[in-house]
Image (cartoon, rainbow, N blue to C red):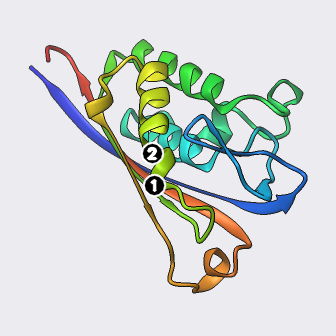
Amino acid sequence: MMNIRIGLGYDVHRLVEGRDLWLGGVRIPHTHGLLGHSDADVLIHAICDALLGAANLRDIGFHFPDTAGEYAGIDSKILLRKTLALLREKGYEVGNIDATICAEHPKLNPHIPQMQQTLAEVMGIPVDDVSIKATTTERLGFTGREEGISAYAVALVVKGEK
């Protein structure tokens, strides 16, 4: 019998000067980067939470706390690999990911294919199973004021025979 589950992830980080901007495992040229204990890749963090939630494995902060020194400055692709290992320990495989990044600037559409390729390689799934979209908030809220960037992700996971 096939067991199919979905999970929802959300993350937000503040934009600051003096940091690189990492989204979907790709360094994006920009005047500001995201502030966080790790590289602050909001897209990967949202995907990790979606995957963990789908498998009822709590959240990214539970497994990779920002109080743990070993995660200081860590590449979020490593956290995604560790998340996949936790998922697979419970017998789940990724079905697909659908994610949205909310940012006023920089323009993200030119970077989406590279993000999809990078994330597909990290997760060991086809590029066609990684959907990434970008949107603005029409200058409303903290995103519109360019104070931060957020991301949402939905993950489908499958347990048992595919």
Q: Find residue 72 and report its image quarter.
A: top right
Q: Which residue is mark 2?
A: 112
Viewer-proximal residue, 37 or 87? 37
160 displayed left or right of 13 = left
**Residue 42 point in image, percent of width and height:** 61, 49
Q: Pointers 2 and 1 in contact (CB under 8 A)?
A: yes
Location of residue 34 with respect to 102 vertically, above or below:
above
The residues tagged by marks 2 and 1 sit, at their Cα atoms, a distance apart of: 5 Å
Location of residue 110 with respect to 123 vertically, above or below:
below
**Residue 31 point in image, percent of width and height:** 79, 59
Element on which disc 1 rests: helix
Q: Is residue 155 visible?
A: no
101 displayed left or right of 7 = right
Q: Find residue 117 and report its image quarter.
A: top left
Q: Amino acid at mark 2?
A: Ile
For the N terminus, which image quadrant?
top left
**Residue 37 point in image, percent of width and height:** 82, 42
Viewer-proximal residue, 152 or 8? 152
Location of residue 62 with respect to 35 vertically, above or below:
above
For the C terminus, which image quadrant?
top left
Which residue: 77% across, 29% down?
74
**Residue 11 point in image, percent of width and height:** 59, 55
Q: Which residue is mark 1?
A: 109
Which residue: 44% across, 20% down?
121
116 displayed left or right of 140 = left
The mark total stands at: 2
Label 1 Cα neighbours within 10 Å, binned few <14 / some 14-19 / many ≥20: few
Q: Amino acid at mark 1?
A: Asn
